[in-house]
Amino acid sequence: MFDMQTVRSLIAFVGMRDPYPENDEEPGPLLSFLLAAEKDGQAFDEAWLLCTGGTFLERAKDLEREAKDEGVTARFRPLDFPVRDVIDYAEIWDLLVASLESIRGRAGPGTRDWTFLLDSGTPQMKTSLFLAARSGIFPARLVQGIPARFAGGTYKCREVRTEGIPEVRAAAGDRVQALSQASVRLEAEGKGPERLQGPVAGSPAFEEALRRARSAARYDDPVLILGETGSGKTMIARMLHESSRRAEGPFVEVNCSAIPESMAEAELFGHLRGAFTGAEKNRTGKFRAAQGGTLFLDEIGDLSPDTQAKLLKALEDKAVYPVGSDEPAPVDLRLLAATNRNLPDLVKEGTFRRDLYERIKVVVLSLPPLRERRQDIRPLAARFLSEWNDKYGENRYLTEEALVLLESYSWPGNVRELRNAVTSAANTAAAEALGPESLPEEIRRASRPGAGCGESGTAVEVELPEEGINLKARLLQIEWEYVAAALRRAGGNREAAARMLGMTGHAFRKALRERLSAFADEGWEDGM
C-alpha cells in the first residue's frame, strides 16, 4: 500500500535511443537503467515518462513492453510533454515545472523516493531536470548511466554528486513562486491547464469554432477539423483533448501526409519482430500508443484507400492487428481527424471512402483562414513577438507601418506564416523597432502598387534597410526554421522531414551536416 511504504519513483524524458537505439541490440538509456535497478534489488515501483509528441509516446509504450518482457515490475506512466522547441531552455523549464507539480498531485498518498535519470532527451531537457532538483523545486536524486561499452562490458549507473556545485535557487525565492510564474507564462502561451484561454479569438467565426470545440470536448465522439494549412487545426485538437475526460491520457498526433504508403499500416497499428524486412523489434504503433487518450490524424485525406479500409475496421472493431499478427489488440481512444482537403469531393472522385468519411465526421469544426479574421492579426503578432522577447531577453516591437502591412497581407500560410514572418523580422532587424523593411519580401511586395497583377505587373526592386543586413546569416536562419519545423512535424524522422521540404534524404542530411551544423549542434541531434 502506498501509505505503508516508500514508493520508488523514476522521472525521465524519453529519447530517440529508447527502448533501443536504431540498429543496435544494446538497450537504450531507460531500459538499461531499469534493468540494472531490478538486478541490484533497487527496482522502481513506477516510472513517469515525459514524451515530447506521439513518436515518443509510442516509444514509451515500446519501452514498457520490452521492460515487462525482461521482468521489470514498475508501473509505467507516460505523460505528454508538448514542448514546441526541444532546445528552448525557457519553454522546457516552464513546462517541466508545471509537469512536475502535476506528477506530484497525481502520484497519490504515501512517501516517495524520487529519482531523475539524466540520460534521455536533449541537453536542454537534462539540464532542466538537474536544475529542478538542485534548486529544491522538486526533491529528487540525480543519476546517470554508463553504457556497457564504456564500463568494461557491463552497464553501470551512478548518482550525480553535487558537492562543490553551488546550490541554485529560483530568483523569486521558493518552489511555490517558481511554479506560479511558470504557470502564468504557460497559460499566456496556451500550454498550461487553462489552454482554452490561450487562442486569440476576436473574429465571430473563430469564436464560434472555439465554442463548438468546448462543447464537443465533453464527449467522446469523433471530430473532424477542417481548415487551411496553418489555420490552427492542431491547436484545436489539443484543446479538445485537454478539456476532455481523457486529458490525463496520451495525445498522439500523426501526420498522415508524412507516412510512406508502404509503412502506413505499421505506423498506425504496429508490427511484430520479423514481420517484414527491417522489422528488427516489435513496435506498438500509434493506435496503441494513444490507449486511454486521444489519437489525432492530421491530413487524413492523404491516406491511401487501402489504409483507409484498415483504419475503418480498427475504428469499428475498437481493435488493431499489428502487422504479422493474427491476434487483435483492443484499443480505447478518441479519434480526432483534420484535413485541408475537400473530403466530399474526394468521396465523389472515389479516392476517399464514404463509409470512413461518415464515421469520422460526427462533429465537424471549420476554422476560418487568417485573412477572414484580420482583427486577430495584431494580437497574434504581439504574442509571437512577446515570446521572442522572453526567449532572448530583448525588447523588439512592431511599428505601426509594419502592423498595417501585416493586416493587409493575404496570409496563404495563415497563423503559421504570421509566426514565421514575425520571427524572421526579429532575427534580422538591426534595431528594436521592426519596421516594414524587416518583414519578408513577399509581404512588402504584396502591399505595393501593381502587386497581384500577375505577369503584367512591373518588376519589384528589393529594398534594403539603411544599415544593411547579413544576407548569408538571414538565409541560413530562415532555412533552419523550415528544417526544424519539418523535423518537429515529422517527430524527428529525417526522411519524412525531407519530403515535406521537397528534398531528397541525402540532400537533407547534407544540409544538416554542413550548412546547418551550427544550429543542429545546439542540441537537436544529440539528445533525442
Image (cartoon, rainbow, N blue to C red):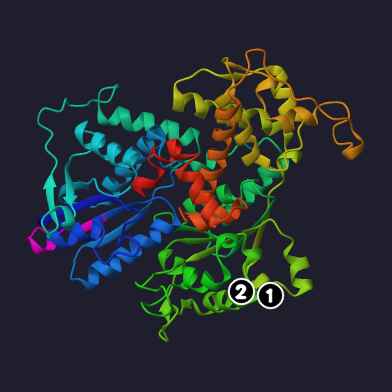
What residue did someone put label 1 on? 353
Disc 2 marks which amino acid? Gln
Q: Residue at position x 88%, y 30% from top? A: 458
* C-alpha span from label 1 to label 2: 7 Å
Q: Main secondary structure of the magenta part?
A: loop
Residue 308 bears which disc, if any? 2
Q: Is residue 165 above or below residue 270?
A: above
Q: Secondary structure at mark 2?
A: helix
Q: Position of residue 26 (x, y in %)?
A: 24, 63
Question: Can residue 314 be seen from the camera position used here?
Answer: yes
Q: Secondary structure at mark 1?
A: loop
Q: Is residue 449 left or right of residue 429?
A: right
Q: Residue at position x 74%, y 71% from top? A: 347
Decide: marks 1, 2 in contact (CB < 8 A)? yes
Q: Is residue 391 left or right of residue 225?
A: left
Q: Position of residue 203 (x, y in %)?
A: 71, 38
Question: Can residue 362 be seen from the camera position used here?
Answer: no
Magenta highlight on residue 86: no
Q: Position of residue 381 (x, y in %)?
A: 62, 29
- The residue sitting at the bottom extreme is 326
Q: Residue at position x 68%, y 75% from top? A: 353
Q: Position of residue 526 (x, y in %)?
A: 35, 46
Rendered image quadrant of residue 176: top left
Disc 1 marks which amino acid? Arg
The region drawn magenta spans 38-47
Of the pair 122 and 366, the residue shown nearer to us: 122
Rendered image quadrant of residue 174: top left
